[in-house]
Amino acid sequence: MCYLDNAATTFPKPQRVNDLLNSIAQQGVVSPGRGSHALAHLASDAVSRVRHRLARFFGAPGDNRLAFCFNATDALNLAIKGFLDNGDHVIISSMEHNSVLRPLRAMQRKGFITLDIAQCDKNGCLNPQEIISRFNKSTKLVIVSHASNVTGTIQPVDEIGRAVRDRGAYLLVDAAQTAGILPINMDDMCIDMLAFTGHKNLFGLQGTGGLAIGNRIGLLRPFREGGTGINSITELQPNEWPEAFEAGTPNVPGILSIGEGLQFIEDEGIAAIRKKGAEQLGYLWNELSAIEGVELHGLPPGSNRISVLSFSIRNWEPDDVGSVLNHNHGIYVRTGLHCSPLAHQTINTYPAGTVRLSPGYFTASIELETVVRTIRTMAKTLLPF
Ligand SMILES: Cc1ncc(COP(=O)(O)O)c(C=O)c1O
């Protein structure tokens, strides 16, 4: 088996994450913040420690400004629905994921907001000028993914952040693909809200993620209400952060697994993790670009990108490539639009999409060699003579 779909979810997880999950499976874990007994306190303290570490990891202004959510989609929905008001104007890039596009399109259709899309180039690169030129007097929020899940392109977030701030608006960054592999400091990068997911490069379980909220955000409405373990007497959602945003029992095993993931990242070093990704990308790019009939999408290695590599094979549908790799070779990749139709329109691979290879920290060189060999053979088949 050769798993090359780490951009969807990282697999396997570091041993220390598996050890923690095994111990939770055997010993259990109770609900945090919802009882005064010792076990509830233990769970609360453990969750608070992970919150503290994550807030520090992203440079969030305080632990109360790190709200746990159930994934990046949940965090993006909180940021978008909790922050925007009737009549606001929003600008996004043309590389955004459906988790950004769909909530906004629904609000736009209801006439609640207006929306503009800043065009990226064929490699998925966003020129900040494309954002700036779309500003109007109602522009409140700009949303940009830190790196694309289709081309791996890293956007100039800090430059965009400064431009957005100078114009009195706010920047929401989708860090689903970058949290854990690129250094992020909200303050330095002028990020007002940062949505992340726990199950990709933070090496946690699925069903985890969060929103880090910068100091400039004064008002954010919860979009999910219910029990929070505090102020139970009031019939309305409490105002205290982060509890206001965390109604319902959280995914405690998942949150704790992120803590172990963070420890792993700190032990290995984020620079070493990125370096390994860059080497894997360099190998795949060099080998695949030499194959006749294979087209690689996005920037070459050594430029502003992460190791998510989309490609197409002449005369092959991406889904057929994925199916043959899966059924005949035990190689698991992602095909199609990757929940990002706008991105494929941008790079001219719409509607069929691409085949996406996303190696991870635990991918061995021999796995990459196998996939290259297999693609070489496939590219020869069906090529016109
Ligand atoms: C760029 C980007 N944004 C958002 C998401 C959504 O993440 P999740 O499925 O964890 O909510 C993904 C997931 O692939 C992604 O790649």
Image: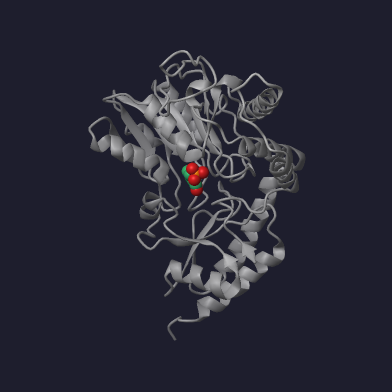
Give the percent coordinates (x, y) of residue 284: 61, 63
- Toward the bottom, the furthest residue is 385
What's the image's color scheme? one colour
Relative to residue 62, is residue 240 drawn left or right?
left
Q: Dividing the image into 4 quarters, which one contains the C terminus?
A: bottom left
Q: Quadrant of the N terminus?
A: bottom right
Q: Nearer the viewer, residue 223 or 305?
A: 223
Q: Is residue 76 visible?
A: yes
Residue shown at the point (49%, 41%) measured from the top left: 155
The answer to whether residue 374 is above or below residue 161 is below
Whether residue 10 is situated above or below residue 132 in the rendered picture: below
Q: Residue at x 30, y 40 (%)?
A: 105
Observer-nearest of 223 and 188: 223
Residue at x 51% of width, y 23% of height: 228
Q: Is residue 166 left or right of residue 366?
A: left
> Where residue 190 sits: x, y (%)?
51, 26
Vertical placement of residue 81 versus 230, above or below: below
